[in-house]
Amino acid sequence: MNKWEIIKKTVSVCLLLSITFSIFINSDVVLALSQKVENINFGENINFYGVVQDSAIRLVTPTVGVEPTPIGSLTPAVTETPLATPTQETLPSPSPSEFSTPTPSFTPDASPESTSTPFPSPLPFPMPDSTSTPTPDPDSTSTPTPTPTPIPTPSVSPSPSDTEAPSRPECLVTTDRTDTMISLSWSASTDNVGVKGYYIYRDGVKLDVSVTEPCFTDEGLTENTTYRYYVTAYDEAGNESERSTELVVMTLANNITGLNAVVNVDGSILVSWNQVARAAAYELMIDEYESVCIYDTSYLHTGLLPNTRHTYRVRVRYAGNDYGAWSEKKVVFSFPGKPLDVGADIIDDNSVRIFWNQVQGISKYNVYRDGELIAAEVKAVEFTDTGLTAGRDYEYEVRAVSGDSESVENQRVIVNTGTGSISANTVLNENRVYKSFNLKSRIINLNGYRFKVEGDLVQSGGTLDVNGGRLEVTGNYTISGSSYLEMTEEEDYVLVRGDFETRSDNNHENKLTAGTLEVKGNFTRKAGVSANFKASWTHKVVLSGTERRL
């Protein structure tokens, strides 16, 4: 082994020991030394001082001391030294004589003479950033290995800050609701990076919920209660959008709470009510006579006469034919709203007096009988008609005249100078006057109008439902057989100037619950069922005659 191979291997061993014992060497120094060793021309003299000087070795205080290795030995001797305070110090530059070596003389047959040259003790070197390519054998004729290029550390540019908020949620609507739940939906928002979710605000307070889709169901609410909602969108950076438009929603009620009736100029009446949770249908009672099953929450009542009184009440029907309670009764008049109140008095079997109230701004009236004009531009508020036949119903209509034409103000009355009766269930749409009246069957519903009998009223069957109206009997009122008298409204009023007698065979429990029955003659309840006259709740009986009665 020649001297140059020994030097080359000694340097390599020193570098290996530096890595093994965590001795750090500047990467530039290692690279320079490696290149120098790899590029040695064994026919030249080597100046190690120049190598060291050019590479600018920087030393730090070692934690492990390494003894110099004799050039003739490949195994270095390591001796532990006490740990020194980790302060950085710079080793004085070695003198040139320590690294100078005589220029060798080479002959083909003789090996160079080895001369021991002192070598500095290994010191802590920084770890090289790159690995060196193995040094080729000096005798090899292969091309020297190129200098390795250090691998650059990739740099990461910081992401720009996201300050753009998502777009505002649009089209906030209700998709479903019950008495305890409201479901919402809206158009999805957009964002320059991406929408992370939505905030839901109820009555101005943000709900503690996680919503990632443009829909939400709010549960655990109170029935028949109004709530206000709006929605905002937010992104990953926490930017929050503008709020959506506010949506006001009411949870459903468990029963009917609002019944409305709107009078239209075409004579119809639109009846509507609130939706009830879990309702299968609704039952609408019209004029306390006609029952209609409806699957919606409104009903248009058509085919009505002008200025007629109508009543409505409704209840919910659940699955299994269970029913809720009836709503309050709604009373309205068809257009134009009862500006006239027409009545009549029977003079005799052949004549009647028709009268009405004065309408403001009107000075003339036209009078019709059974649709035929019998008196034009009457300036008084009454008219007497003659030539009638007893036992026949006559319908009188009074119309107000405004300028040269009739106005919408009009009203009717039916008069019979003999004995009246009905052959079918009848709901009154006008006042009625009879000389006497027999009710044998069917139902007569006063529907808020006046029903006047100037003689006796004999009820041997059927039902007389006062229903907010007024029954006046100048003679006696007798109830018998399978008959009912119904008074269930506070406005119900029955006046009997003669005697009142009931011997009905029907139980009147819950039939006489409100209103007033005034009797000026005798009040008599005779044999029949024990409850053929059973007043309850707010119903009153007033005995107002001036004579003593038994």
Image (cartoon, rainbow, N blue to C red):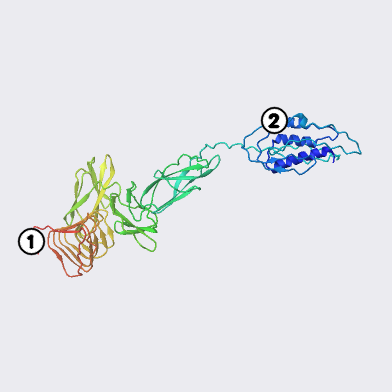
Residue 273, given in percent of the width and then of the height, sits at 35, 52
Could you classify mark 1 by the number of other residues whose Cα lies within 10 Å: few (under 14), some (14-19), or many (20 or more)?
Answer: few
Please tell me which residue is depicted at 79% across the width and 35% down the height of the picture.
Answer: 117
* Rendered location of residue 204, percent (x, y): 40, 43
Q: Is residue 129 left or right of residue 173?
A: right
Q: Label 2's element?
A: loop
Residue drawn where x is 83% and y is 32% of the image: 102
Going from N to C along the chain, the mark reached first, 2 or 1, is 2
Residue 418 located left or right of residue 243: left
The one of 436 and 22 positioned closer to us in this rendering: 22
Mark number displayed over residue 548:
1
Q: Amino acid at mark 2?
A: Pro
Q: Quadrant of the N terminus?
A: top right
Q: Nearer the viewer, residue 166 or 20?
A: 20
The foreground one among 324 and 22 is: 22
Q: Nearer the viewer, residue 83 or 241?
A: 83
Q: Is residue 165 above or below residue 183?
A: above
Q: Secondary structure at mark 1?
A: loop
Check the image and report above or below for 292 versus 211: below
Image x and y of residue 399, in percent:
26, 46
